[in-house]
Amino acid sequence: MSTDLSKLRGEILKELSLNSINSGIYAGGWVKKPSGRTVQSISPIDGKNIAAVMTGSKSDYELVVRNAERAYEEWLKLTPPQRGELVRLIGNELRKEKQSLGKIVSLETGKTTVEGEGEIQEMIDIADFAVGLSRQLHGLQMASERYEHRMYEQYLPLGVIGVITSFNFPSSVWSWNSFIAAVVGDVVIWKPSSKAILTAISVMKIVTKVIRENHYPEVFSLLTGSGSEIGNMMSADSRVKLVSFTGSVKSGRIVSETVARRFGKTILELGGNNGSIVTSKANIPLSLKGVAFGSMATAGQRCTTTRRIIVDEKIYKEFVSKLVGIYRMVKVGNPLEKGVLVGPLIDDTAVKNFNEAVKRATKEGGKVLVGGKVATIKGLEGGFFVQPTIIEMPKVTPITCEETFAPILYVFKYKTLDEAIRIHNAVPQGLSSSIYTTDLGEEEMFLSAKGSDCGLANVNTATAGAEIGGAFGGEKDTGGGRESGSDAWKSYARRQTVTINWGKDIPLAQGVKFDV
């Protein structure tokens, strides 16, 4: 197995032309000798190095920001549809490179092959969305109370924005922000996770190739490096008008507070501790599929992963028994092999967090129904694998109010739907939620103001995943940000209310008059 992975490493590095690039800084061109430390990209599948990348520090940051400011001045000379054309060309190039890019995503983050390519498909989809959006950046026209006046609103670009992404969606979340921001008129500095650094470089190589070949301004920059250093500089820099941050609640608070001190803008996509309610009127086979996928896809490392299920006591025993059976049948192993649903966690720290969460849950009264241990895969002993785990909990406890990025599912029992909703909303996070029911009243209660307190509410489908056409984001400790579809594009613009007096006089307030 390790021999095959070694071969794959070489093939991917060659396919994506990564052999000749060891720089993680792009500012109108690849910086040959960044001033930061060298970072090893490690595959979580076997724990071995893929490639080394030189990252940036303060001097590189200044270079990137100055380059972005210059690009912004040129980008403003293009109309939104012309900007959309660049995004269209990038989307077409991503289509050609989908398979190769999907491989590097899988190798570097441990996603299955299907999920790796799905990551790139999501970039293609949001590119298509952004192209259409480039011709629909509209504002409202309002009736003026003044005679011979017209009043309307328009949305203008912010300027330079920063996008800080996490390892679990190493490229698609960047595109959610960057393609939308670009058609609005912004330029983007990307600070990716150091755990998915080769994916970011691979994407930037393709994006910048399209830019150069078609003679567009260098509107996309790449700035790899320490989150505490680069992220803090970006958050404190008034030249960066908006910071979009995806990551932990703890880090998100720091970003939010730092940007707020200078009255900048943020889009925060922080923790998710997503719950699903399964009522006695649910379609059981459908619900089992939704819960199983939602809790185990991407090895439980999605921000929308189902981490809690609240099951009606009338069907509790039957439902949980069948779910445990599914968990026991699921294949854990090399995500590049067919039939594998659960690949590795991202690193050794994630495995330690998994072990600690299981230990805490049992101390808080939980009972492990299946899993709960580290998994050893033959030939991949250096990988970071764990068993998908279900833990029965007697009540809401501190560990169930925390997000553990691992395939751990906490199970609760309820008597009334009011009780189920109270359990569901008892956590500080508010990203994604779902209810499984065929009862209209139960559905509507869940979707009412008394129901789910999350930014995403699903009926008879999993908490995991989201369509690009809807605004993505959550409430409470999730941060309140919105990305991707609907009118989330307005976050990347400044709203301006315009009043035009087309008459020959100017009516003044409070009857004031001037003799002129």
Image (cartoon, rainbow, N blue to C red):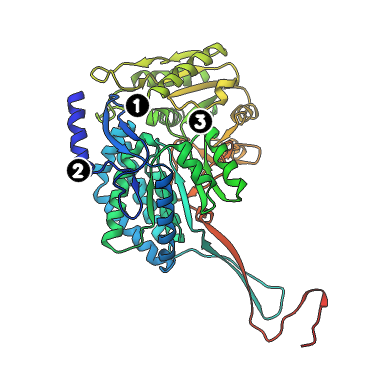
| Left or right for 375, reference 147 | left
- The residue carrying pointer 1 sits among few (fewer than 14), some (14 to 19) or many (20 or more) residues within 10 Å by Cα, namely many
Between 23 and 458, the residue placed more toward the observer is: 23
Q: Contact, CB < 8 Å: mark 2 with mark 1?
A: no
Residue 350 vertical position relative to residue 215 in the rendered view, above or below: above
Residue identified by numbered label 2: 15
Residue extending farthest right: 511
What amino acid is at disc 2?
Answer: Glu
Position of residue 58 measured from the top left corner of the image (x, y, whole percent): 44, 44
Residue for point 20% across, 43% down: 15
Residue 341 vertical position relative to residue 360 in the rendered view, above or below: below
Element type at mark 3: loop
- The residue carrying pointer 3 sits among few (fewer than 14), some (14 to 19) or many (20 or more) residues within 10 Å by Cα, namely some
**Disc 1 from disc 3: Cα separation:** 26 Å
Q: Nearer the viewer, mark 1 or mark 3?
A: 1
Position of residue 136 measured from the top left corner of the image (x, y, whole percent): 47, 64
Residue identified by numbered label 3: 282
Mark 1 / mark 3, whichever is N-terminal? 3
Mark 3 / mark 2, whichever is N-terminal? 2
